[in-house]
Image (cartoon, grey):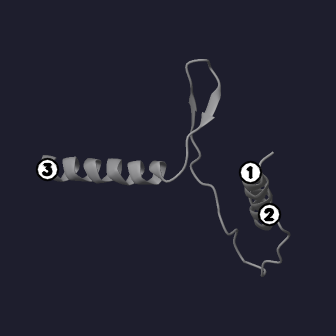
């Protein structure tokens, strides 16, 4: 293995270990991240796909905005 490749691999492992280190979080009254309204889609091969990321809240907000606009124009 090349010297540069070994160094890159060592650095990647070090960064992963840093992210996975045990942490002492202060006590919280509520969960830090709470999952709400989780939706699953079925792909073409009937496997559950957890659609998520930043796109879902943005698309929900966009849909809500469009519905709100259509309701206002219908009145």
Q: Residue furthest toward the front? A: 2
Q: Of residues 49 and 36, which is closer to you in this image?
A: 49
**Marks 1 and 2, Cα distance to the nearest angstrom?**
14 Å
- Residue 75 in view: no
- 21 sits to left or right of 61: right
Q: CA distance from mark 3 to mark 2?
A: 56 Å
Q: Residue 16: give x, y in percent of width and height.
A: 77, 59
Tell me if label 3 and label 1 are in contact, CB under 8 Å. no
Query: Tag 2 or tag 1, which sits nearer the N-term?
Result: 1
For disc 2, the marked residue is 14
Residue 58 horizontal/vertical position (percent): 41, 53
The disc placed on residue 59 is none
Residue 51 versus residue 16 in the image, above or below: above
Cα gap from disc 3 to disc 1, whole angstroms: 61 Å
Q: Which residue is mark 1?
A: 5
Q: Position of residue 54 (x, y in %)?
A: 49, 54
User: Between residues 46 and 68, which one lies in front from this camera angle?
Assistant: 46
Can you name the residue that lies furthest to the top here? 45
Q: Quick one: 74 or 49, which is closer to the camera?
A: 49
Q: Earlier in the sequence, mark 3 or mark 1?
A: 1
Q: State which mark lies toward you, 1 or 2.
A: 1
- Camera-nearest label, 3 or 2: 2
Secondary structure beneath disc 3? helix
Residue 49 is situated, as x and y percent measured from the top left of the image, at: 61, 33
């Amino acid at each position: 293995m090349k010297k540069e490749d070994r160094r890159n691999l060592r650095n990647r492992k070090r960064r992963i270990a840093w992210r996975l280190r045990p942490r002492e979080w202060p006590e919280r009254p509520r969960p830090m991240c709470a999952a709400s309204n989780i939706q699953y889609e079925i792909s073409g091969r009937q496997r559950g796909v957890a659609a998520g990321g930043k796109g879902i809240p943005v698309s929900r907000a966009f849909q809500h905005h469009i519905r709100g606009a259509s309701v206002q124009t219908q009145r």
